[in-house]
Amino acid sequence: MAVYNNVSATDIKQQCSSIANEVERCMARWQYFAIKLNTITAEDMTAMGIDQNYQNYIGSLRVALLNIVLKYSNQTPLNSDDPSYLTKLFSQLTVF
């Protein structure tokens, strides 16, 4: 029997459970955030000082988040865009 860096069955089970719970939390959070973004109008964003170009990026991120959630749920995504591009673009963004 091979032992890898003293990793036990309990360690693996706990890590699997932790990651599965994290995925579930992320899916719920991303869907909630995308839905909230959809409630903010272009006029609201302009009033906040967000220019049209950035509003377009935010709209694309919203769709990307929804696509990730839809694909996770084995549903048809809204479009065929690759969500990783916008996720990387916004990795430093703090909207709220």
Image (cartoon, rainbow, N blue to C red):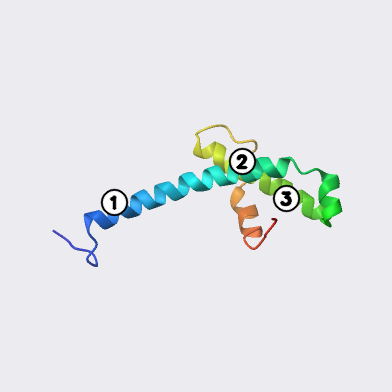
Neighbourhood count class around disc 1 (C-alpha, 10 Å): few under 14, some 14–19, many 20 upward = few
Quadrant showing the N terminus:
bottom left
Which residue is disc 3 drawn over?
Answer: 58
Left or right of 33? Residue 58 is right
Q: Which mark is residue 29?
A: none
- The answer to whether residue 71 is above or below residue 93 is above
Disc 2 and disc 3: Cα gap in Å? 12 Å
Residue 60 locus on image (x, y percent):
70, 47
The residue positioned 59% from the left and 52% from the top of the image is 84
Where residue 15 sits, quadrant-wise, is bottom left
**Residue found at the far left of this picture:** 1
Query: In front: mark 3 or mark 1?
Result: 1
Q: Which mark is residue 66?
A: 2
Neighbourhood count class around disc 2 (C-alpha, 10 Å): few under 14, some 14–19, many 20 upward = many
Disc 2 and disc 1: Cα gap in Å? 30 Å
**Residue found at the far top of this picture:** 75
**Residue found at the far front of this picture:** 96
Left or right of 35? Residue 40 is right
- The answer to whether residue 95 is above or below residue 62 is below
Q: Amino acid at mark 1?
A: Lys
Of labels 2 and 3, earlier in sequence is 3
Query: Which secondary structure, mark 2?
Result: helix
Which residue is disc 1 drawn over?
Answer: 13
